[in-house]
Image (cartoon, rainbow, N blue to C red):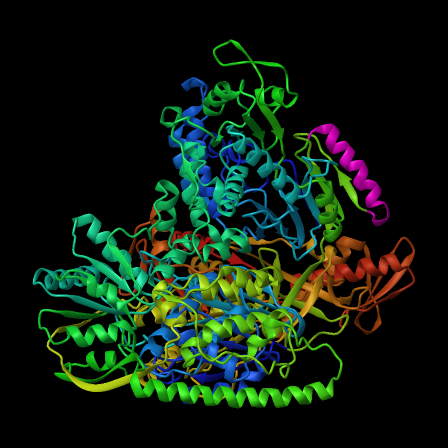
Amino acid sequence: MKWAVPVSTCPIKGKPYCFHLDHAASLPYFLEKTTFKGRVFMTHATKAIYKLLLSDYVKVSKVSVEDMLYDEQDILRSMDKIEVIDFHQTLEVNGIRFWCYTAGHVLGAAMFMVDIAGVRVLYTGDYSREEDRHLRAAEIPQFCPDICIIESTYGVQLHQPRHVREKRFTDAIHSTISQGGRVLIPAYALGRAQELLLILDEYWSNHPDLHNVPIYYASPLAKRCMAVYQTYINSMNERISNQFANSNPFDFKHISPLKSIENFNDVGPSVVMASPGGLQSGLSRQLFDMWCSDKKNACVLPGYVVEGTLAKTIINEPKEVTSMNGLTAPLNMQVHYISFSAHADFAQTSTFLKELMPPNIILVHGEANEMGRLKQKLITQFADCNTKIISPKNCQSVEMYFNSEKMAKTIGRLAEKTPEVGETVSGLLVKKGFTYQIMAPDDLHVFSQLSTANVTQRITIPYTGAFGVIKHRLKQIYESVESLPDEESEVPAFRVHERVTVKHESEKHISLHWTSDPISDMVSDSIVALVLNISLEIPKVVVESEAIKTEEENGKKAEKVIHALLVSLFGDVKLGGNGNLVISVDGNVVHLDKQSGNVEGENEGLKERVRVAFQRIQNAVKPIPPSVS
Amino acid sequence: MGTSVQVTPLCGVYNENPLSYLVSIDGFNFLVDCGWNDHFDPSLLQPLARVASTVDAVLLSHPDTLHLGALPYAMKQLGLSAPVYSTEPVYRLGLLTMYDQYLSRKQVSEFDLFTLDDIDSAFQNVTRLTYSQNYHLFGKGEGIVIAPHVAGHLLGGTVWKITKDGEDVIYAVDFNHRKERLLNGTVLESFVRPAVLITDAYNALNNQPSRRQRDQEFLDVILKTLRGDGNVLLPVDTAGRVLELMLILEQYWTQHHLNYPIFFLTYVASSTIDYVKSFLEWMSDSIAKSFEHTRDNAFLLRHVSLLISKSELEKVPDGPKIVLASMASLEAGFSHDIFVEWATDAKNLVLFSERGQFATLARMLQADPPPKAVKVTMSKRVPLVGEELAAYEEEQERIKKEEALKASLSKEEEMKASRGSDNKLGDPMVIDTTTPPASSDVAVPHVGGHRDILIDGFVPPSTSVAPMFPFYENSSEWDDFGEVINPEDYAVKDEDMDQATMQVGDDLNGKLDEGSASLIFDTTPSKVISNELTVQVKCMLVYMDFEGRSDGRSIKSILSHVAPLKLVLVHGSAEATEHLKQHCLKHVCPHVYAPQIGETIDVTSDLCAYKVQLSEKLMSNVLFKKLGDYEVAWVDAEVGKTESGSLSLLPLSTPPPSHDTVFVGDIKMADFKQFLASKGIQVEFSGGALRCGEYVTLRKVGDASQKGGGAIIQQIVMEGPLCDEYYKIREYLYSQYYLL
């Protein structure tokens, strides 16, 4: 048996693992507007932020109502369908087990390990192997997956070490402020923003001279999400839990939220973190327009900047920029680009894969060229370990086949003795999920929630004739018709074919008792048919005439029939000595012993034909022995 | 053969003593729970002491004294050194519970069984797991998987599932199947047919009124007292059931806009709530949901004020109020003092939300009828003055001199032994180790904590002490919070410390509330004075069951649903244990054990089992039929060997032997009735049988009392005269089964 693992399609369940828009934004549409019937799992923190984030997205998106793929209501409904999973918690759906590991990247981000009948697939999603101020580094799973689906956002690039980046960041801000300038940090509301706030809050705590310089974060969304950050402390790293022992590190001491630009009193140096990160519009752009022409000010771009945004433009430090009201303004402020991106870089990816050594690697999420370079580099790195590296395009499905050895556990009565090679094992094979057990039917209820049943049937048939007649007739059909001892049942009774009991209940009725199974049902049907026939025959057939027929006569009759049938099959059938029959077909002669059924002769083919024919004729003519079932 | 399993109770069988059991699986010894009671009687731990050193792992199920109270003592004194496993809340709230116990005890007695440091170091090697996390043990326990599952009762409460070779041993005590405000119900019922189930009989004889009714009565009696200008005292545990009570009160106060003040008073009240706020993922679905939707943390308490010392309570203006104070047993802690003060006023109410531990003041007061007067011991820690102080100082000085002398002697020996070797003579940090506590034991945590850290960092030889130190007079400055320290003095070691030690330091110095901190750092010489007095109990005493444990009836139905192959009963009065044992023998399974303390019972399953590989050839011929979660098929196979030498099943080369037909399935008469009715057949129940159509009757025979579990083979009798209907109904009946 083989398992196909569809990769680029969503087989059983969607499992968003991180709350960024590029991961979860289609979920309400997917859940509410498509035929998707599966289940969705998220970590607690992801679910809490998912709702806030998407509601915010719906509110601020400028698309007309008709073009909206989903609305607030869809989001709320989707919330009820989303189930939560905690890190390391193992869940099982249709026998497929899965659990998740910390992924770093953002709060609540998870890497999912899916175990299908022993074949393990790890999906990293966005992950980071570097521990920062609040997040743990992505864990190295305990088990090696058979397939590792891994992000390739940063391809072969390398990040600066964290402390270098942090130093550049705080130095840039400190020097700007000490010159009396203002610092603008355009940042996406969630994820890195919280990390930067932690850095700033800590830096301020350590530098009392800065205490009079205010820090603001101007994002209503970030403010709303702060409660989530303040709550899911246990999803963060040791550092945070140690700080939590003193006070909640997300209760910032030097940072306050800023509702809008109207509430902002722009006097003297300050640090403002504002969204959006691309400076397209909104508060970060308003502040940028206000501050860009003063060379004392600075703008720190802390993360990935999207192509085509103003943020991307100013990285190249042009002389002039166009402000929102369409006028051009000189760009005098300093621009710093310090990437705090929490995606794995090449060093992290390659050590992660080296630790895991998965036999199959599938690269996803990355720009095509970068992914190509990464693939090449990984191929050289894993050149001598037979690793398969694939980078499928969108909608291209990857099929892989795994031979999984199916093991069953034989338990209970069946397993009292371990069998030797060549012996047979018969029993119920019970499959639950991907585990197999073999057991005796009587043990079924012990080892599973299934139970077995016996159905006893009792049917009464009107019959007024002599009871003996039925018995006699049945004897012609069944070899085993046993009278039952009288003391058990006070009425005359006998047992047919060791299965069905016939009782003479009264002058007018007989009854049949048996335990249901296909053969017993058949036997009982034949008895019923026979009884009904006798009832019909009674007026005209003289019962005694049949009753007096001797055994001998029966035997003779049977022999005649056998002879006649053999003649019809083989033509030339003569009586030989010792009650043997001599059958000759096309010059080949065989001798058939009627008693034993032995056939002797030269022609093997004919011998076999005669043997089979004789057996079948015997079966048809003689009463059915009880062993036949 | 199956996995060998032995259970040895160490404490808490045939009575309500703390829980502690030894479960040995193929020679790997689990200590499940390590409880103590509020009397802290070391004699209870005798059986544990005998086996402590052989324990390979400790599993904790609930964060209260009864389940983990003995951990610090056992680690310190009994040689228990195994790794401990628990959920995050059990770890954290358990730690706080022990702090509270220690501080309450210390306030009224020369408590010396363990110190705050012992608590810290005991909890230091706790591995925290999440619910349903399959944790694979390694080393000696290779092949064993442990997993905590939701138990209800207390936050983080755990039903432990220990699995080896596909056989489950489940330890489920104090579970609660009912969903509450704070917690979801247990998932115990989702486990079916485990090899061994260890459970308690604590509540086997109790039955509870409906939750709604109980809640209403609870609030009614409280409000009546408050409106009558009385105070309400709820003696509670430190961080367990009190959370549920607070939620009930909060909710009711919000709904009805009440403004009677509510106080939560333990030595660790504010840190308890701080931590609880971050445990949302361990709470009930409704709490999680409300947080997702409104970001309202259920433990942002609006009506409950958190207090950590009694003086704060005394500052509160007079008037009716509710105080939730630890300990629930009234043996120590704030609840004890408040009880003594309030008991004499008939207007007041003392409301017990749980049964008091055996032989405690709370238990005495819960007797029916309640005693008119009780004798209590009021103890107080007072600073030493006058002659006593002088005597004490003299004594200290003498001890120090002796120590210094001893130290210098041993130092000389040491010097002789390792002449010339650098033994950190000049290291000023080392000298510290000889600094004796400036006063009684109360001061130990401060200095001791410091010492611990040093030892963690670089272990100096125990004999390496400097002869010239220490100073005798403590000349440091003092303020409300204790000694004024210069943080810089401690800054150096921070850098050298690894994370683990840092945590201990933080736990100790950081999170403790100011009040308790003042107690810890309070190094003024002090002593405990006690006086016995008789308190006239005039106040109203009420007991209501807010224990959050499943009641007798539910326990029985859960047990028969889980239907373990073997059942071990622990923890519960002799009467309850015997009652439940008899019940289970009749209705659950034939193997029910209720061992005595120290008695080892062998619950190795007498199951035979062997593993075979299913060959592909065989499997391609097997047709499964689906039945709920299961798929079943009949197989006839020949045994062969694989290349690796294990057994494998191959298809038979000869025609398969015949076998008796098996009807697989379970029909419920009521469901079948519906089914027949939908097929247009007249059906009705009459005299225990199902009459179908005019003549045919169906009845189920056999042991009808056997509930759930499906422990027997169903017997169905179908009777009727020969007619078309008979065969039609038979056809329908067969359609409910799978014939194999």
Q: Position of residue B383 (x, y in %)?
A: 31, 79
Q: Nearer the viewer, residue A579 or A232?
A: A232
Residue visible at 16% across and 49% down in the picture: B256
Q: Nearer the viewer, residue A124 or B308?
A: B308
Q: Quadrant of residue B434?
A: bottom right
Q: Quadrant of residue B719?
A: bottom left
A17 relative to B313 in the view: left or right = right
- Residue A305 visible in rendering: no
Q: Position of residue B684 (x, y in %)?
A: 28, 56
Q: Position of residue B471 (x, y in %)?
A: 50, 78
A339 relative to A586 in the view: left or right = left
| Residue A371 among those drawn in magenta | yes
A65 relative to A603 in the view: left or right = left
Q: Position of residue A61 (x, y in %)?
A: 45, 23
Residue segment shown in magenta:
A367-386
Q: Quadrant of residue A467?
A: bottom left
Vertical relation: A313 (above or below) B537: above
